[in-house]
Structure formats: structure tokens, C-alpha cells
Image (spheres, helix red, strand yellow):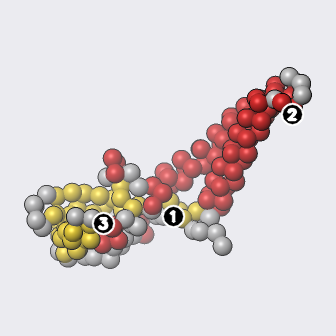
């Protein structure tokens, strides 16, 4: 059974662009490399041919995987997200109860998480701990360094 993944419009667009690049640029390039290696003679002792065929197999596997991911992707719409609780695509402002540090994160699907962009996965320990909480709630998050308490001080989209 295919796994359904949730994407923002931006995340799904990136996947489609990557698939397009693989099919229209990389696939013809590898086909050309195979043809050139084939022209060099005996295929049984042709390392270039073997390498190009292996690269082709890896590329076709990537293309197949991306095709499958895109076919089973579901688009998330920010307009339909309730701001009373923390859900996927919520922008959550939290405050560490120990040191008073405030942070703001957007909860996204696993495949779009990027800590540099302050996007954390709903499947991460922090993401799981925040899901379903309301403003003012305290989320107790189990981390490798012990349990950390965060107060939800704002939810937006």
C-alpha cells in the first residue's frame, strides 16, 4: 500500500521540478553516455558502459520513487486550518519554561522539515508534543536531555 504524504504547494512544486530535471536532463545524459560507451567496442570489458548502466538503474529508481511519491501526495491548504489548536502548517510560538527562551516554528510534514527555515516535522518529538495543544497549554516534550516544558504562547498560520 502506498504511503500518503502531505505537502504544501511549495514542497510539491519542488518535487515536481526535481522529477522534471531527472526525466528531461539527467535521463537523456545517461542515455548518451551509454551510447558513447557502446560505440567503444566490446561491452564485456567496458567499464564506462557498466558504470553508465549502473547510473541509469539508480536514476530510474529515483524517478520511479518520485513518481510514486507525487502520485500519493496530498496538498495541504493553509486556509482550512483551525487556529484554536496546533495542527500541521500551524505557526507556533512557544516559550521554554526553564530558561524563558521563545521560539517560533512552523509544523510541516516530515519531508519538508528544515530547521534552518524554522520548519519542524509533526513527527519530531517537539512536533508530536505540540500537536493538538491550545494557546496557554503546557507541552511536555521528551528529549534526549530529559523532559522539557514549553508553553504555547501563540498559534497562527
- Rendered-image quadrant of the N terminus: bottom right
Label disc, if present, on residue 6 of the rendered structure: 1
Q: Look at the numbered disc 3 and give the secondary structure of its residue.
A: helix
Which residue is found at the position 34% from the left and 48% from the top? 117
Residue found at the very far top of the displayed protein: 40
From what the image shows, is residue 50 above or below residue 141?
above
- Rendered-image quadrant of the C terminus: bottom left
Asked whether the viewer can see residue 8, the reply is: no
Q: Residue 55 falls in which quadrant of the image?
A: top right
Q: Which residue is mark 2?
A: 44
Q: How many angstroms separate mark 3 from mark 1 (CA)? A: 19 Å
Q: Residues within 10 Å of mark 2 (few under 14, many from 20)?
A: few
Q: Which residue is mark 3?
A: 126
Q: Nearer the viewer, mark 2 or mark 1?
A: 2
Question: Residue 33 location in percent, x, y?
Answer: 76, 29
Which residue is found at the position 69% from the left and 51% from the top? 61
Question: Residue 44 location in percent, x, y?
Answer: 86, 34
Q: How many angstroms separate mark 2 from mark 1 (CA)? A: 46 Å
Q: Which mark is first along the chain, 2 or 3?
A: 2
From what the image shows, is residue 34 above or below residue 65?
above
Label disc, if present, on residue 68 of the rendered structure: none
Q: Residues within 10 Å of mark 1 (few under 14, many from 20)?
A: many
Q: Which mark is first along the chain, 1 or 3?
A: 1
Q: Look at the numbered disc 1 and give the secondary structure of its residue.
A: strand
Q: Which mark is first along the chain, 1 or 2?
A: 1
Question: Residue 63 location in percent, x, y?
Answer: 68, 49
Which residue is found at the position 59% from the left and 68% from the top? 3
Q: Look at the numbered disc 2 and give the secondary structure of its residue.
A: helix
Q: Nearer the viewer, mark 3 or mark 2?
A: 2
Q: Is residue 144 left or right of residue 7?
A: left
Which residue is found at the position 28% from the left and 76% from the top? 133
Residue found at the very far left of the displayed protein: 99
Amino acid at each position: 500500500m502506498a504511503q500518503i504524504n502531505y505537502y504544501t504547494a511549495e514542497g510539491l512544486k519542488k518535487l515536481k521540478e526535481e522529477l522534471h530535471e531527472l526525466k528531461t536532463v539527467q535521463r537523456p545524459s545517461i542515455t548518451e553516455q551509454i551510447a558513447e560507451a557502446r560505440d567503444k567496442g566490446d561491452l564485456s570489458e567496458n567499464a564506462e558502459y557498466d558504470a553508465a548502466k549502473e547510473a541509469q538503474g539508480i536514476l530510474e529508481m529515483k524517478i520511479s520513487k518520485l513518481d510514486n511519491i507525487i502520485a500519493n501526495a496530498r496538498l495541504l491548504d493553509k486556509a482550512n486550518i483551525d487556529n484554536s489548536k496546533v495542527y500541521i502548517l500551524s505557526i507556533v510560538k512557544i516559550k521554554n519554561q526553564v530558561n524563558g527562551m521563545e521560539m517560533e516554528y512552523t509544523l510541516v510534514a516530515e519531508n519538508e522539515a528544515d530547521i534552518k527555515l524554522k520548519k519542524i516535522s509533526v513527527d519530531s518529538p517537539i512536533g508530536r508534543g505540540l500537536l493538538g495543544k491550545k494557546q496557554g497549554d503546557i507541552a511536555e516534550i521528551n528529549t534526549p536531555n530529559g523532559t522539557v516544558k514549553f508553553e504555547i504562547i501563540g498559534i497562527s498560520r
